[in-house]
Image (cartoon, grey):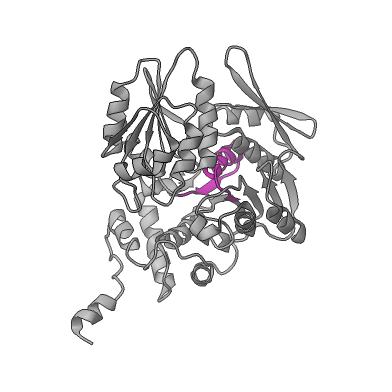
């Protein structure tokens, strides 16, 4: 074997002492041949080297097609309001990797991340890990060293074989089950539900926020004797719309009525977090719940960045999320307001399904290219959406240019919605922050 071929087969060397966070992140992107490699065996080996026993903290694991990040943020706020110290792990991030790990509601600093990366690298030896797996283990290290009382962990993809699932949950939440990540999870809700239900553990409590969960989820709950709290049975959400367009929502459970905010986050996520909180702390007062709920927001989730015209961003990237977003926009489309959509997506997404969900409320479309791995070019996106017969479609080479065109064509009382992926929203937010 030549010296050249030998060098090519050598794994990249880990950053040394004094390396920056960006150097570590660049290295993480190069250490595994595939971006996604589902399975727990490799992660479990390294976890056991890092932790001799299960962390002392209480672990809440959140899986689902949509609504995970909102549920994590809401439960995090509720636990803090009850006096608990919390750690949260979510993915992906919008603009800075540090966003993925929060200690007591604040993003971790670079030094904490670098230290955690160093510990994972020292423990893994010859075990190969993906970018996500390595980062997940680093999050566990950071949370463990922080001494927080509760870990709230968002599953990255699926549930059963996701790296987050190597730690047994003390409470599990399944927010929704719909079609996404078909190549990895399957093409129907029953198969996908089985993967989501992989976060359940025998005898633990669990919240299922999907009003119509697949039988596969219910069967797993019965088989493992899970204390299941179900939307539509153990609690209900009543939403109303007044004549003036004002929306309201109320959670009904155990003879209690709890007001839910109808702002930027799905009420289903808020309700799931409340039911989880009441399971963890049955004595928490309704006033604390309602006051805390009214203050929760999540960057990139129907987030308003500008007024006159109102400009919102949303990370929704599948038909299920697009249906929710369409309903939110429909409620705001009053008094002759028009809605201008800036849409950019990844190539493995159901862009036609997304567009069909949004088409009834959108008056003009600005399709943008995404210059990222798996990103769709604007012309390719337009070709994929041709069967949808959308009206007033223009194409742009970047989200920034699409936003500029949308603003130029919008009246002061119109609405601009920028959506389609975390990458889409990140590029738009950079224009304002």
As drawn, is 271 to the left or to the right of 111? right
**Residue sitting nearer the eye, 413 or 353:** 353
As drawn, is 55 to the left or to the right of 25? right
x, y percent for residue 204:
71, 55
Give the farthest residue toward the bottom: 1
Task: Inspect the magenta stretch and tell me whether residue 199 lies in it.
Answer: no
Q: Residue at x 77, y 57 (%)?
A: 222
| Residue 72 is one of the magenta-drawn residues | yes
Locate residue 9, reporting x and y percent. 29, 77
* Residue 264 appears in the picture as rendered: no
| Left or right: where 330 falls relative to 257 | left
From which residue to which does the magenta span run?
62-91
Instruction: Identify the residue shown where x is 68% and y is 51%.
Output: 214
Question: From the viewer's perspective, is residue 419 above or below residue 58?
Answer: above
> Residue at left 48%, top 32%?
358
Image position of 424 with respect to 162: above or below: above
- 177 lies above or below 288: below
Judge by depth and name the residue closer to the eye, 152 or 364: 364
Vertical side of 225 occupied by 42: above or below: below
Residue 332 image offset from top left, x and y in percent: 50, 20
Q: Nearer the viewer, residue 315 or 337?
A: 337
Q: Quadrant of the C terminus?
A: top left
Quadrant the N terminus occupies:
bottom left
Residue 75 can be seen, yes or no: yes
Q: Quarter of the image holding residue 370?
A: top left
Residue 125, how many percent across, how many down? 41, 75
Is 79 in front, or is 189? 189
Q: Residue furthest right?
A: 255
């Amino acid at each position: 074997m030549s010296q050249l071929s030998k060098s090519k087969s050598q794994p990249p060397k880990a950053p040394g002492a004094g390396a920056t966070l960006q150097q570590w992140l660049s290295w993480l992107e190069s250490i595994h041949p595939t971006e996604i490699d589902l399975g727990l065996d490799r992660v479990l080996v390294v976890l056991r080297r890092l932790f001799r026993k299960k962390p002392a903290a209480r672990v809440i694991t959140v899986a689902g097609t949509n609504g995970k990040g909102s549920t994590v943020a809401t439960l995090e706020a509720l636990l803090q309001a009850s006096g608990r110290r919390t750690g949260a792990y979510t993915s992906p991030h919008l603009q800075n990797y540090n966003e993925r790990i929060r200690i007591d509601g604040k993003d971790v600093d670079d030094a904490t991340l670098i230290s955690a990366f160093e510990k994972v690298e020292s423990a893994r030896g010859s075990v190969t890990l993906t970018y996500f797996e390595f980062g997940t283990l680093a999050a566990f290290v950071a949370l463990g060293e922080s001494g927080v009382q509760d870990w709230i962990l968002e599953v990255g993809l699926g549930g059963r074989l996701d790296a987050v699932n190597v730690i047994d949950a003390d409470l599990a939440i399944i927010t929704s089950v719909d079609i996404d990540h078909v190549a990895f999870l399957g093409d129907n809700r029953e198969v996908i539900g089985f993967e989501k239900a992989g976060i359940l553990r025998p005898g633990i409590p669990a919240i299922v926020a999907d009003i119509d969960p697949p039988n596969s989820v219910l069967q797993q709950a019965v088989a493992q004797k899970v204390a299941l709290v179900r939307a539509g049975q153990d609690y209900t959400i009543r939403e109303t719309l007044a004549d003036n367009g004002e929306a309201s929502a109320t959670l009904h459970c155990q003879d209690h009525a709890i007001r839910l905010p109808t702002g930027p986050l799905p009420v289903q996520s808020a309700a799931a977090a409340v039911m989880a909180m009441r399971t963890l702390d049955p004595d928490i007062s309704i006033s604390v719940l309602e006051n805390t709920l009214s203050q929760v927001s999540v960057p990139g989730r129907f987030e308003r960045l500008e007024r006159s015209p109102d400009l919102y961003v949303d990370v929704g990237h599948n038909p299920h999320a697009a249906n929710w977003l369409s309903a939110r926009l429909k409620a705001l489309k009053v008094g002759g307001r028009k809605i201008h959509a800036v849409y950019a997506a990844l190539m493995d997404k159901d862009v036609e399904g997304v567009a069909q969900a949004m088409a009834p409320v959108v008056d003009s479309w600005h399709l943008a290219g995404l210059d990222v791995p798996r990103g769709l070019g604007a012309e390719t996106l337009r070709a994929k959406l041709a069967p949808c017969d959308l009206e007033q479609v223009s194409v742009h080479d970047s989200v920034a240019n699409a936003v500029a065109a949308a603003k130029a064509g919008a009246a002061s009382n119109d609405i601009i919605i920028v959506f389609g992926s975390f990458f889409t929203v990140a590029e738009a937010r950079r224009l304002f922050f």
